[in-house]
Image: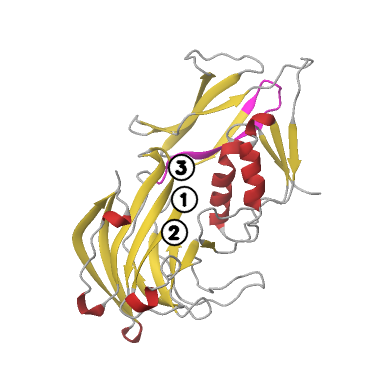
Amino acid sequence: MLEVGMEWAEVKEEKKREKTHRTGFRVWGRAASECGWMSNLRRSVGWSCVSLSSVRGGGAEGEDIAWVNVDLINPDPSEDDWVAVFSPAIFNSSTCSIENEEIQSPYLCSSPIKYKYANYSDSNYTATGRTSLKFQVINQREDFSIALFSGGLSNPKLVAVSNFISFANPKAPLYPRLAHGKSWNEMTVTWTSGYSIDEAVPFAEWGLKGETKMRTEQHVWYSYRIGHILSNGSYVWSKTYSFKSSPYPGQDSLQRVIIFGDMGKGEHAGSNEYSSKDPGALNSTDQLIKNLKNYDIVFHIGDIAYADGYITDWDQFLQQVEPIASTVPYMVARFV
């Protein structure tokens, strides 16, 4: 269960200040349809329900994806209104100069992770001023906020900001990546985490699938999970994954290899992603996941993620390929 406090804010451009009103209304991991509308005091913008509902994993153990449900009331709606997701939750909505020709609008000093037009799911939004939107977010070690803008992408003006929301454990170990070691019987696993070396010790637990005893065998399935030992002695775990070990040198076995290059990341959940350059990457990723049992190793020979200045692209790419990279060695290289 994820507790989310509710609030709404109106940004008054002429006074250069923000009015914020808070209520005691709280949501316990519920969908937006279960939330009641807040009163629209002084015709201000109202976020009746901004909730975070986990759809994969749970709590501090392996939580990596969630849905953000947004119900919006706007007394002054227009067709060019748009709603964006920001992380960290505190962001700079000022307009910044364009650094290079690859920068895409909106030209905000803090880039949104993703956005949708307010009328995306309800064509009557401009008449009623009410709409419901749904965003899929991934654990990126920071909190989130939802913002309403007017003026379209070319002339964005901040109208309102939601309450801040976050995963139960933003620092949880996520997105493991396997790689072959220097020897045939070595497997390396790396992962993403918000814990520093000073506050937690990283480690991996592994063993033959279905057994608790740890021993090494060739060409068999192992289960594993990654985690951290915190300074207070407690453990933080990922969910459990599995991989098949390599055959020993000279063993008569069929090894199936996938080799490709130039794959970025895409958006599965219907949002517009900022600086999204490779939506076709989803086709390749989906096919690789679908045929995961039909190959033993992947060679991704650059380019990777196309994260041109946006660190969130790396998180999204690693989450996208996690079903592959956590199961078979995902070997990367670059063109020379």
Query: Alpha-carbon neighbours of circle 2 within 10 Å: few (<14), some, or many (≥20)?
Result: many
Q: Separation of disc 2 and disc 1 at Cα?
A: 8 Å
**Residue bearing the label numbered 1:** 140
Q: Is residue 312 above or below residue 185?
A: below
**Dot 3 amino acid type:** Ser
The image quarter containing residue 231 is top left
Residue 212 showing in the rendered view? yes
- 174 is within the stretch colored magenta: yes
Q: Nearer the viewer, mark 3 or mark 1?
A: 1
Q: Locate residue 224, reporting x and y percent.
A: 51, 26
Position of residue 292 in the picture relative to residue 107 (left or right): right
Q: Residue furthest toward the front?
A: 124
Q: Is residue 143 visible?
A: no
- In the rendering, which numbered label is found on residue 196? 3
Q: Secondary structure at mark 2?
A: loop
Q: Earlier in the sequence, mark 2 or mark 1?
A: 2
Instruction: Give the labeled residue for mark 2.
Output: 87
Element under disc 3? loop
Give me the residue at 50% from left, 73% from top: 108
Residue 325 location in percent, x, y? 61, 37
| Boundaries of the magenta span | 170-187
Q: Is residue 12 above or below residue 89?
A: below
